[in-house]
Amino acid sequence: MKQILNNLWSQRAQNVWLFAELVVVCFVAWTQLDPIVVRLFYRNLPVGFDMEQLVVADVAEIKALTGEGATPEERYERADELFRAQAKLLKEHLLAQEGVENVTFLEDIGGYPRLEQHLVQQPCGNDTIFIPWCYFNEEEDFFETFGIQPIPGSPSQHEMSSSYHGIANVIITRSLAEKMFGSPEAAIGKQMVAGWYLNDEPFYHIVVGVVEDVNADGCMYSTWMAFSANGRVGNNMHNRLAIRVKPGVNVKRFIEEVNYHIEEVSTEYLTVSGLIPYSDVETSTYDREGEYDFNLSVATAIFFLINLCLGVIGTFWMQTKRRTEESGIMRAFGATKGRIMGMFLAEGIVLTTISMFITCVLYLNYVKTGLGQLCFNPYPSQPDPTWVANKPLHFLIISGIVYLIILVVVSIGIAIPAWNICKTKIVEALREE
Amino acid sequence: METIIKLTNINKVYRTEQIETQALENVNIEVEKGEFLSVMGPSGCGKSTLLNIMGLLDEPTSGTVELCGTTISHNLSDNQLAEFRNKTLGFVFQSFHLISSLNVLDNVQLPLMYRGIGYNERIRRAKEVIDRVGLSHRMKHTPVQLSGGQCQRVAIARAIIGNPEIILADEPTGNLDSKMGADILGLLKQLNEEDGRTIVMVTHNEQQALQTKRIIKFLDGRQIQ
């Protein structure tokens, strides 16, 4: 250790620049990685159902769905009826495919069924909260297909999908039930008020079921959620399908099979297209801009980090290369290659650790002065119990990740040239002055 | 007398794409324990190559090297060679080869560090040998703060701290003025006479070579005397 510190101290003139470079890189890496790590963490939160066996597809028209009638309304009604009949047939065709367990129609361009945000509160209550509200099509096996589980004492999946028509009946998640009614069991049969009014009167909903928590969105922690049936499947330009394939069936293979036998699946008017595994769907329904920003920030971060890391690797590479003679001397007096590698790497680790410490102090001040901030839940309506909302833990985790990345980068910058100079013959190494 | 270094039929050929240079040709040398041998010859005659082969810093193209009764075979791993160098050999180079970032004390204790000796013991022994080469007052100085002669003394201290059987000195006075050179030679002679260490010294300087117990001369990679 003493030799390592001696080496670092004796090369302090170069090391000051190295420090400065490392601090800048750590700082930039911090700002770039924080939103990405947070977003990735939210994306990977359990969604509350088995999404591995889910496939999402667009419903596409092969032939224009037009209806005959004297008025536009009549024509629209006929077209809607035709669509429903065709949709039913399409669903039957899909269910007849090997490996398909359930199918449900969705009404949204995202992976999820249509989600809106609504203010809800208990009747006469003051505690108003924002929640995502999910609309599903009546009698379309929504809960079965998604695999959203009812809590004990709640109606079955089939009952929830088919028996409670109209948005006045609401099914809520366990954590929302706990928040609003104290316990999930106590919620069933209770009323709640949503944030819209009929004739200036609050609109009351009755809780008809409680399901296990579902994380509503891919961009945050969001398990307070309500579901209600909003009519039958209709001729909507954004119609999509969710298909649950049986356990053990390979989803990618299933998609290939459906695409291959697309004629068997299609009806006269409708077909499915763009089949993708549910896990590949951009899951943020609220935050589509955020989703775009995320992709942009990932691209930017990758660009910056690659450049910065190449810079760091280059600097350490040069620094290490310069020490060929030193390694030759050490080997002449009995140092093994492993020992020399270890010493160079340990120097890098010490430098990185000190730089990271300085970065942490700088970043804390940066956040403290309000110039920067830690990345949090973008819609903080629901208290976030994860590390993201815990400032010290958040800071430690991101710092740890940045530290590890920079450590790997520095180690690469040292290990490769160090290994090369260790492979140099001692006599040749001693000639390098 | 016991033979401590035995080189048999040593050949060293340097090959590049265009040319092949025979640096050593059929060299046979035996050095007895406690001997002070000087190797002389003009530049490029293979003296340093010979010393590097003796010191296991380089491999011969063919031939056998035997040190302290151990035949150095190609099968020895890098780590085994490193251990052998550490315990048996001490080097003194013309350009000192001190680590510029370390002070005298740390430079000198380097071989002991690789031997796994504890810090306190290393420091004690390093101070002892530094005292012996007359540099007690320079212990905390770095090589750039020392004169050439002092650097070479540090190099000698480093060479002897591990108590090696053999010291290999490659033109140890080559970068020094005559007075300093004489000092260094005196020190090497002292190590040979008082400690009985075997020393092989490469030199250009005939006057200095004459002060050693035996001289061998090289010309064009061949031992001529």
Image: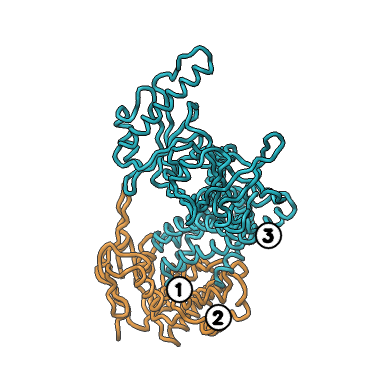
Chain colours: A cyan, B orange
User: Which percent across, then down, holds residue B4?
Assistant: 32, 80
Q: Which residue is mark 1?
A: B207
SS for tag 1? helix
Q: Looking at numbered disc 3 in the image, what kind of residue is underneath it?
A: Val
Please tell me which residue lies in front, B35 or B16: B16
Decide: marks 2, 1 in contact (CB < 8 A)? no
Q: In the image, which is nearer the foreground, mark 3 or mark 2? A: 3
- Judge whether A405 appears above or below B84 on screen: above
Which residue is label 2 attached to? Answer: B130
Above or below B87: residue A388: above
Location of the N terminus of chain A (image quadrant)? bottom right
Callout 2: residue from which chain? B
Mark yes or no: residue B67 visible: yes
Q: Amino acid at mark 2?
A: Ile
Q: What residue would you read off at disc 3? A: A361
Q: CA distance from mark 3 to mark 2?
A: 44 Å
Q: Which chain does tag 1 point to?
A: B
Left or right of residue B13: residue B140: right
Q: Tell me which corner region of the image, top left, top right, bottom left or bottom right, holds residue A354.
A: bottom right
Lower position in the chain sequence, tag 2 or tag 1: 2
Q: Can marks 3 and 2 be said to lie on one chain?
A: no
Task: Report the Cα–Cα distance between label 2 and label 1.
Answer: 27 Å
Q: SS at mark 2?
A: helix
Q: Residue furthest bottom?
A: B194
Which class describes the residues within 10 Å of circle 1: few (<14), some (14-19), or many (20+)? few
